[in-house]
Amino acid sequence: MTEKITAVKGMNDVLPKDSYLWEWLEAQVRDLMHAYAYSNIRTPIVEPTALFVRGLGEVTDIVEKEMYSFEDRLNGEQLTLRPEATAGVVRSVVENNLLYDAPRRLYYMGPMFRHERPQRGRYRQFHQMGAEALGFAGPELDAELILMAHALWQHLGLKDVRLELNSLGQPPERAQHRQALIAYLQDHAQLLDEEAKRRLHTNPLRILDTKNPDLQGLVNAAPRLIDFLGQTSLAHFESLKAILDANGVAYTLNPRLVRGMDYYNLTVFEFVTQSLGSQGTLCGGGRYDYLIEQLGGKPAPAVGWAFGVERVLELIKAQGLAQSVAPLDCFAIVPQAQSFPVVFKAVESLRRLGLKVQMHAPSLGQAKPEEGKLASLDDKTPWQHVGSMKSQFKRADSSGAMYALIFGSDELATGCVTVKSLRDGQGLQRVELLKDIDQWGKALQSSLHPKS
Ligand code: AMP
């Protein structure tokens, strides 16, 4: 047999057993973005490598070792699969002059690529949904974005999601802190690990979020950036906190929160959970007031966040919140092939009312005219072998539907259908008249989809 080709390590298929949840989350996030007046932007997955080197910073983990970069075979251009979307969004905003007449609120969804060590919650192709507000300088937009993410977790019903907040100040404040930090770390050089030594002069701020347990005491006592902030930076931070306080959004101040990209200033934040093991950061973001200028645009402030779709979906599943999201409302069980004309009419009515209905249909594998012989297209009437009630019920159960609609001959003889719950554990059922289908179908629809 020819050897199978398998997916690239760390890059996963999203199969039907999960894809309905992805689609559901996408729909929730789209509604959320529309409620906050964010418009969709779709930028290319491949961008010039220089965009990320200049945008994210040369000595960041992503640029140093995680980018999928390659040379265009035809013209030698250096290209990279996007490791994140903010740089691409800013490139597009500048290139298309989107900030010409007004600030912009934008959102995106899509795959990102980082060559990391694959593990639970960390993949080489992963997906982010993110929001960016460009052209706004005040803390109100930092607050709007944080409130929006907070509203999403609430809407999804997620528990154990905590907000961590910090301010990185402005470049001159960071420069002062950097000097103090380097001096402090040099005084304790004998305690530093290899990575910290390497970062001492390139990106000392990143030493503060080291995972090395031996360095925790050292970084805990290090000079804190927040102590170097001037009046204006502190006022920005205080105003943000006041809006969060007034809206009941709890947060923890984490002076060691620095984030992985160099482009941030002032506000940075992360939403974290204890429920996902070591990859507990769901969402990260902050202000990046200098990136637009750095990528060739007219100076303009901006703020944004992105969350990891795989991690949020894993949390949804871990907290049992996926159960209420059914891929399907009804599964139609059809014991006799001659019933199809009537059944079609009924399920079409239900679909018009907005219900998701799967109809049982005979498949070749299921139609077994003779023992031991699969039906083939040569069989005169393979469609007559609709399969036993038992096998149809099995399919109904594994379809994820909330209800089975049983179109048995007894039911049809009296113009009825049996509606049987597949999810209440007791199999409660009732008989409905087909002539009243619009009435009970509507009631079923609004009980299953209260908001639509
Ligand atoms: P970042 O762009 O690094 O700030 O990441 C934002 C969010 O994307 C993180 O909080 C994660 O939820 C998610 N994320 C980042 N890298 C990965 C990855 N390699 N695999 C899965 N999710 C990721």
Image (spheres, rainbow, N blue to C red):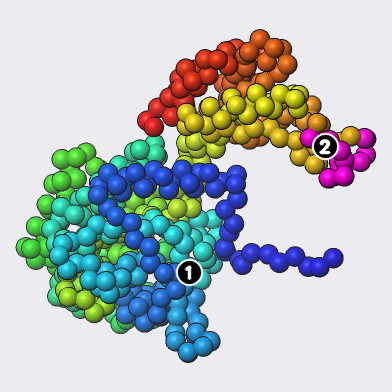
Determine whether, in the image, residue 263 is placed left or right of residue 416. Answer: left
Most prominent secondary structure in the magenta stretch? loop
Q: Earlier in the sequence, mark 1 or mark 2?
A: 1
Queried on whether the Cβ of the residue with tag 1 lies below 8 angstroms from ligand 1, the answer reads yes
Q: Is residue 224 visible?
A: no
Query: Which residues fall within the magenta stretch?
Result: 370-383
Density class for disc 1 (Cα within 10 Å; few <14, some 14-19, many ≥20) is: many
Q: What's the mark number on residue 114?
A: 1
- Give me the residue at 47% from left, 28% from top: 353
Q: What's the mark number on residue 382?
A: 2
Query: 163 above or below 176?
Result: above
Magenta stretch encompasses residue 93? no
- Give me the residue at 60% from left, 12% from top: 431
Determine whether, in the image, residue 44 is placed left or right of residue 361. Answer: left
Magenta stretch encompasses residue 372? yes
- Count of numbered tags: 2
Kind of residue at badge 2: Pro
**SS label for mark 2:** helix
Determine whether, in the image, residue 53 is placed left or right of residue 321. Answer: left
Q: Nearer the viewer, residue 338 or 244?
A: 338
